[in-house]
Image (cartoon, coloured by chain):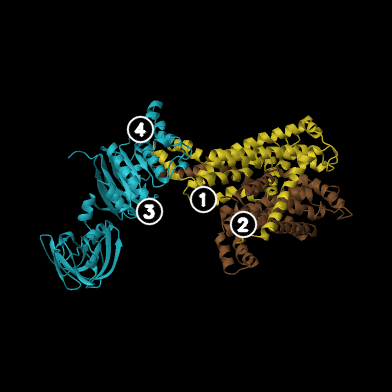
Chain colours: A cyan, B yellow, C brown
Amino acid sequence: MTEPFLSIRKLRKAFGAFTAVHDVTLDIPKGEFLTFLGPSGSGKSTTLYAIAGFQDPTSGDVLLQGKSLLSVPSHKRNIGMVFQRYTLFPHLSVAENVAFPLRVRRRPDAEVKRKVADMLALVRLESFAERLPGALSGGQQQRVALARALAYDPPILLMDEPLSALDKKLREEIQTEIRRIHRETGVTILYVTHDQEEALHLSDRIALFRDGRIEQIGTGEDLYLRPATDFVAGFIGNSNFLAAEHLETVNGAATVRLGDGSLISGINANGSFQRGQKARLMIRPEAFRLDQGSTGAELAVEIVDVAFYGERRRIVARTGAGQEIDIRPTSATLATQDVETRHRPVFFDPGAAFLFPA
Amino acid sequence: MLLDYDRLGWLKVVLLAFTAMVAAFLLLPVVFIVLLSFGSSRWLAFPPPGWTLKWYQELFADPSWIEAALTSARIATMTAILAVAIGLLASFALVRGTFRGREILRGLLLTPMVLPVVVFAIAIYAFFLRMGLGGTTLGFVIAHTVLALPFAIIPIATALEGFDKSIEDAAIVCGASPLQAKLRITLPSIRIGIFSAAIFSFLASWDEVVVAIFMASPTLQTLPVKIWGSLRSDLTPVIAAASSLLVALTLALMVVTALLRRKLQT
Amino acid sequence: MSVEAQQGIASKRIPAGLGGLLPALTLIGLFFVVPVLALLLRSVTDPAPGLQNYAALLGDGTYARVFFNTFLVAAVVTIVTVLVAFPVAWMLAIMPPALASVLFGIIILSMWTNLLTRTYAWMVLLQRTGVINRALMGAGIIDQPLPLINNLTGVTIGMVYIMLPFMILPLVGTLRAIDPMTLRAAALCGASPLAAFRRILLPLSLPGIAAGGLMVFVMSLGYFVTPALLGGTSNMMLAEMIAQMIQSLLNWGLGSAAAFILLVVTMALYALQIRLVGARRAAGGA
């Protein structure tokens, strides 16, 4: 196997008695877009800061092309970074902001000029070159910050929740820009966010952090379709968790008994279960089918509420055991009369359902 | 509706009339002194029987006035430079530092602003007599820097608190050394605070009377000491001429401040 | 790889922080704390060790009068300043920006004008043959010139003039922080303007009034220049007495003791101010 481009080795960071990052190990190939996803306080930002050199790890190492970065001060790591808050230099024009990293590197004027023009073209802000940051919108400021971070062709670009201060529509717009820029430049990006949609939209791979550890790492599809733990299942996408009792597992396919006494077979079992052990059955809201011709497992429910959400409907239903579940069939596949019967069965593919320990 | 300007009714008329009177009260001595400095009456009759420039001629003919003004300018300039430099370093420590007792140290550094000047004046007077610094320029500058330091720290620390540290971090990630980042990014960003600090500490020294009265020697006296001495002997219109020039200086400083602020903020 | 060798940004903060304070602490320690402490020491050692200086100051009727006068002047100045400043601050807080900036300009001009210049102007204006007396006599309001200078009236006028900006400016901040919606709600609830003022506006601005008033009181207690020039010999204030004891009488022991008393009173009130509004605002800072 070839040597990884960026490698995080058993990284640990403790603040007094509190350990923010527990022995995180991670290899990142060149050109990858990797997102650190997780709730606040899960250690994702701390890991990023250790790579940037803002925080000294308690132990462990960060290697870039086999060489340790830890003894290199931040300003000599040659890493690009876009911050959560707007960090443009307020007294310098947009062009001078982008030129700043080149000027501190004492690059010749002609090169600086050319590079600034290239970068502003990359983020499509050529006409704003002479403006001061104060005259720019939040989205424009972050695009300039991106241009500045890429101006010196850093091998790695770190992005610390760069879109969290923007509103939803603008966020989606700039996500598309970031994807395009990643494609065009081929830079390796480490991106921190707590927004799962953002992570799914942007990343090649996602590392999901929880309490200072990586809970699961993989593509968005991996995490969504094959969650390793109930935390992953709960964090990525929406999930229903039904209380269940494990009966048996054959070749990874489990059979459980639900609270209303019904039996369901062919479920993906995560881990090994004893007979009679309490477990949680996870089903995605969009995995349910309502049409009578559907195949798969069947669940008897009582419809409590139906709401129209544009592309989808959202149905709240109650199981025989009294648990409320969330069902989101697409609006197009569903006529209103389909949900008019209050007591009715709903169907799902047991292969898309997962069993986790309670 | 008491805080809606357009809905106050008759109350607005009353309050505005009162406010106008207070504004006139605030303006009265300043305007009056300028008019008086051009009046021809030695006994300060008002309105003056005629207009003249002779008090200004007398003022500029007397080398002790010029000498005093130059002394004040020299001391105030040195004080402003020292206070801003020391205040800048202290502000970084007070705002960025993570050590314990930060608030207590801040309080200590600001105390000279709160303690009655007369207490500090006799204390430093006695101290300098013993150290042989009484009546020296160095002594003046040290004492005035103590008094000016709070006026330098407050605007700089305020500006620094309003400056997002992430911007400095961004400069460092861009490849600037920590010192470069401070010099090229942070200082220019808080320049309004530094500029205010320079003005305030200059004025704190330039207008300082009490310490100066104690510290002055026959060979070294500042402008306020010169005015003070003249005031105690007689109310000659020459003082009005000198005062008018001080008013002009204040106005000039206000205009420069306003212009610079406008320029720095855009 | 050694963790010690690292030069991360965060790790650099702490030592840099304390080092930066060194020049300021040296200056204040050597040329402020030490001289003031030496002065206090002198108050119990000059001319002989003991508390006789304090006994003399607190036991003598002449000095008692000075203490009383000092508090009286400070109290009168504070009350008049608050009463004059409040309506002005109120208007400043809500008037159109163009008008407000003119008024702010006037306030700043008066505040930045040399202290002695302002006091000199009042000496000329208030004297027996001054403009104010002439104007009043010319208008037939009075027959004899009013004694406006070298007494409590003169000191009060001169001091209020100096203190007004220190009261108005923070009060504008307090008043601007009050949501006008509160007052509209009060009016809708049926409160008359007087009731709205008494029950809403005044209580909400009270913290600003208290903080500003306390600051004016403390500054007035130790003021030297204006009382010395506009006040009379019969109502001398503490700061002037201290200066006289040192400069004219060369009585260092008594002067130091009086200075210490002024220091203790001022610092006690300053501490109260900090309790009231917090350290930063108490120092007039951010």
- Residue shown at 15% from the left, 62% from the top: A350
Query: Which mark is drawn over residue B6?
Result: 2
| Chain holding disc 2 | B
Relative to B97, say whether A326 is above or below: below
Are dots 2 and 4 on a single chain? no
- Tag 2 near tag 4, CB within 8 Å: no
- Asked if residue B14 lies left or right of residue C145, the reply is left
Q: Which of marks 3 and 4 precedes in the sequence? A: 3
- Residue shown at 89% from the left, 54% from the top: C144
User: Between A351 and C82, which is closer to the camera in this rendering?
Assistant: A351
Which residue is identified by label 1?
A: B102
- Asked if residue A307 lies left or right of residue B212, the reply is left
Query: Would residue C84 be seen by someone viewing this image from the given angle?
Result: yes
Are dots 4 and 3 on a single chain? yes
| Chain holding disc 3 | A
Which residue is identified by label 3?
A: A16
In the picture, the quarter occupied by the N terminus of chain C is top left
Secondary structure under tag 1 reads helix
Q: Provide residue C175's location: percent of width, then percent of height.
A: 60, 57
- Asked if residue B232 lies left or right of residue C51, the reply is right
- Tag 3 near tag 1, CB within 8 Å: no
Marks 1, 2: nearer the viewer = 2
Which residue is identified by label 4?
A: A118
